[in-house]
Amino acid sequence: MKREQEELYYPRLFLDYRDGVEGIKDLYFGHYKNFEDIQDKYSWLGNHFPGENRESLVHELKAYNMSLEASSETLQNIDKLRDSKTVVVAAGQQAGVFTGPLYTIYKAITAVKLAEQLSSKGIPAVPVFWIASEDHDFREVNHIHLQDMDGGVEEITLSGENGHFPIEYVPVDLPSFLQFIEQLEGHTPSTEFKEPLLQLFRESAEKSNSLTKWFGRLMAWLFRKQGLVLFNPLLKGIRKNSGSLLSSFCLHRESMDDLLVEREQVIQTLGYHLQVKREDGHLYLFALRQKGRAALFEKNGRVVTRQGEDLGTIQDIAEEIKTHPELFSPNVITRPLMQEILLPTLMQVCGPGEVSYFGQLIPLYRFFDLKPPILYPRPSVTLLEPRMDRYMRKYSLTEKELFNINGARLHYLEEKEETSVSRLFESLEKTVEKEYGKIKAELNHISSQLGDLTDTNRKIVLKDIAYLREKAEEVLQEKHKVALGHFYKLESSCHPVNQLQERVYNIFPYLIKYGPTFWERLFEGFPLEEGHHFHRWR
């Protein structure tokens, strides 16, 4: 995919960072293409991530991953984190049903392969996936899309509401989950791989008491051979290390504002838009209340919720945060900073939006005596199923044309027909408009009523032309019905609802259709190189 096409899907700041455009690197205090920057962060971690934090981290991670029935490979990776030389390649995403969109899986694969690459270069690294259990937007994670058996895009949705509570605290309604699994069953073909996967979904749902736990179990199962470590920031034993930093957000809001305003001005002066819009007075924190997660604001030296509840003075809340950090959570700007306290993060696998908002918050790292991770832009992948690959070859389509199927479809029809129906009727309509304009001008000299009658007659003629055009297009569609059906399925498969496939579809319908061999080949062939790629298999 060429740069001009990528700009239709990705923020320009992400693309410029990825491509190493001069001047952009300075916004991030380091770049993934510069191994010296990676080594610099690695050395910093050796001196700044305490050994006692590693011990509590390993203890909590082992208990949590064992509760997800993690593999021995994962437990071995957790043990490696006891060594002060071992660092983390992190990735993360919300806990979507059935693991959510494909890009969630791609982030995790990238983290695994990047950790392997670093280890081969003498930097021991393990892949850790941060489950965004504190997020509270249930509607973002309660559905998946798949290509149904007729080739169209279908959405299936998990019923239920969570109010404003973090997803971690939303209990699993087992009947709703089983109904959701039944929806998937009804929209996917019967294959030899289907029933074992449906059984996996049922059993894992029955063993899970939250959506994050169900997400974690499925991720642990998918990556059981790769040793992916699952991380939940709401684990109490891990969260206790974050109190001091969370408290500082509360105490230093004005200084943070000043740094962020200055950085935002730089970004906008460079011609980029801001990925995150801040609110005046926001403390960059949430409180976990009985009625859900509440955004915190400073008002006249006191802390109030968005709903207007007064929680106390800034100093009182700062002390409460130190004592009970599990009752507070960071927002989108401060979450990456908290990660530095909880994990020895060398590199962070980021999607386009994440790279863009990191550009805004980087100055906060220096303010809190932290060092940002080296950001690694997640590769983008479109899965090209065997049948779709055959259609591409049959109609001699380029990869670029997959993202403009409508144009390719029209080109195909024009090649098959001696004349273009669209151009034929567009020409006719223009001629009618032009000639009626001349007639009206002449008849107006005789009578204005004749001019009005001319307009009425023109509309009747254009209506008849539109009717004829519709019939011609119907005949053309029927004549090329099979080919147009292939184009429709190509579009739904590779560029559904005018979006990149990875943002729409889920991994499990592919596993149902193609089985474990598909997963093995995807992982083996997954590219670490930046940019967009196609993955084919036979």
Image (cartoon, rainbow, N blue to C red):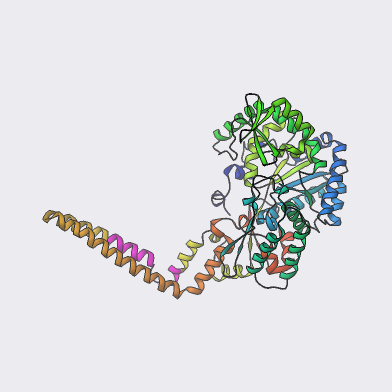
Furthest-left residue in this view: 446
Res 332 seen here: no
* Closest to the observer, 535 or 342: 342
Q: Give the range drawn in magenta.
A: 413-431
Q: Where 214 sits versus 286, above or below?
A: below
State left or right for residue 150 relative to residue 37: left
Q: Where 288 sits versus 530, above or below?
A: above
Residue 418 located within the stretch drawn in magenta: yes
Q: Where 14 sits versus 109, above or below?
A: above
* Closest to the observer, 248 or 275: 248
Rendered-image quadrant of the C terminus: bottom right
**Magenta span main SS:** helix
Residue appearing at x 30%, y 60% in the figure: 430
Q: In which quarter of the image is residue 51?
A: top right
State left or right for residue 440 relative to residue 241: left
Residue 479: give x, y in percent of width and height: 44, 75
Residue appearing at x 29%, y 63% in the figure: 462
Residue 223: give x, y in percent of width and height: 77, 57
Residue 146: give x, y in percent of width and height: 62, 62
Residue 384: give x, y in percent of width and height: 63, 64
Rendered-image quadrant of the N terminus: bottom right
